[in-house]
Amino acid sequence: MTVTVIVGTQWGDEGKGKITDLLARDMDMVVRYQGGNNAGHTVVIGKETFKLHLIPSGIFYDNVLCVIGNGVVIDPAVLITELETLHERGLKADNLRISSQAHVIFPYHRKIDAAQEKKREAGRIGTTCRGIGPCYVDKFNRRGIRIGDLYNEKLFREKLEWNLEEKGFQLREFYGEKITFDIEAIMEEYLGYAHNIRKYVVWDCSGLIGEAIEKKKDILLEGAQGTMLDVDHGTYPFVTSSNPIAGGACTGAGVGPKNIDDVLGVVKAYVTRVGSGPFPTEIEGKLGDELREKGGEYGATTGRPRRCGWFDAVVMKHAARVNSLTQLAITKLDVLDDMPKIKVCVAYKDKKGNLVKNFPGTLEYLAECQPVYEEYDGWMQDTTKIKDYKDLPANAKKYLDKLSELAGVRIYMVSIGAERGQIIKL
Ligand code: IMP
């Protein structure tokens, strides 16, 4: 029996979907603990590609209970579309459970997200404009409407009325949007969604997970985004509005920290980021473009091109510490197959020439830091069909060893392609 947390160690898009899908097979339960439909998981099964934003990847296994925890923010229209896609392909998804305490995204959240981005101009975060941030704001401001509220029409109406009044004012008066909300239409729409998802809703989700822990089941707690997008430990304010780090699994699923046995960090063999914000090892120009094309680095949710960069050990060590990583899953090693030279950032240097080993606590200091690189010879060989670690080219093993040494964490698996079978276990 193990409770494992799976986290992204960079700026998201590390390939957690594939690793979760692989691990889910042997799990009794997979729980998503934060984020919303800002995330996107691509799972390739044979010739079929599935893009999931909210539903945990474990949904493809009937015997795995898939839980959307209290820490997630849910756009019900997106959830229902995902369910329909699964149904159309013959997947019943009867193994889905949704916490009644998860918060609901409304049209005003999406409008505020977009209006804020429009008004911010220079300081634009580059959000996915899915209403994620404004929904979390309401949660923490105690104005939020939770899944469970949708089943109490009187309470739902009261909360919605209040929110529409407040958000309408904010959007019109501050953001200059010409907007009015029709409460009856929103009520009708959301009561329809509530009816549609009723059978999946669980009223004591933490209790459900707790029982599974007591029964010594294997449980995977799945985070979205990544450590550097964490609202507390990422590159604030260029972050998402929840806690993707392992600690977020405790609050977002209702599990105590002593119940967590393993924390698996998913690490891309290079680094990418979508949206604005600092990215010390970013590769500009032709090489960055090549990496993007080779790695198919376009956002699973918004289709935006991802910025690409070299592996950053300062970020890696930060992630190892704030998540208490116990193991690593390295992904997309194959994307580097035909790189003659590969750089690894081993530390930063600030403008006074001091070596910086811990990730800077402010963006101002980070801006003064330059990456210190070591350069490695590439392996210039196709790795996509390799099944055994010992068969990897010597230079690829050297590169992996270096990443593990810099992280101070052992490698558990290496992914060398999008297919389920393209994985090397150590
Ligand atoms: P938000 O989460 O939509 O508020 O966006 C905040 C920041 O997080 C932006 O830079 C987004 O591009 C980024 N972001 C949100 N979700 C993901 C993800 O799943 N992968 C990578 N970046 C993400």
Image (tube, rainbow, N blue to C red):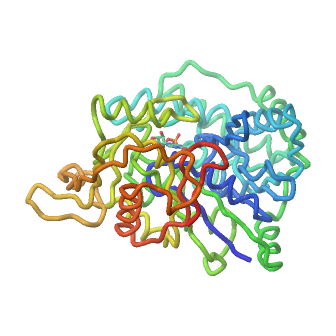
Residue 41 sits in which quadrant? Answer: top right
On-image quarter of the N terminus? bottom right
Q: Looking at the picture, does residue 161 appear above or below residue 102? A: above
- Tell me what residue is drawn at x 76 percent, y 58 percent: 25
Question: As drawn, which residue projects farthest toward the front?
Answer: 391
Estimate the x, y position of residue 322 in percent, counting from the top left.
44, 68
Q: Is residue 165 left or right of residue 218?
A: left
Residue extending farthest to the left is: 352
Count of marks placed on residues: 0
Residue 174 percent location from the top left of the image: 47, 30
Residue 366: horizontal and vertical position, in percent? 24, 53
> Residue 397 appears at what percent x and percent y?
41, 60
> Which of the pair 344/116 is nearer the observer?
344
The quarter of the image holding the C terminus is bottom right
Decide if residue 387 is on the left or right side of residue 70.
left
Using the rendered image of the protein, determine whether residue 243 is visible from the camera's viewpoint: no
The quadrant in which residue 238 appears is top left
In the picture shown, does residue 13 fall above or below 187?
below
Between 426 and 95, the one nearer to me in the picture? 426
Give the residue displayed 37% in from the left and 43% down from the top. 380
Residue at position x 33%, y 55% from top? 312
Q: Given the current orientation, which residue lies at the most extreme top position? A: 178
**Observer-nearest residue: 239 or 173?**
239
Query: What residue is at 86 percent from the left and 46 percent from the top?
Result: 93
Res. 351 in view: yes
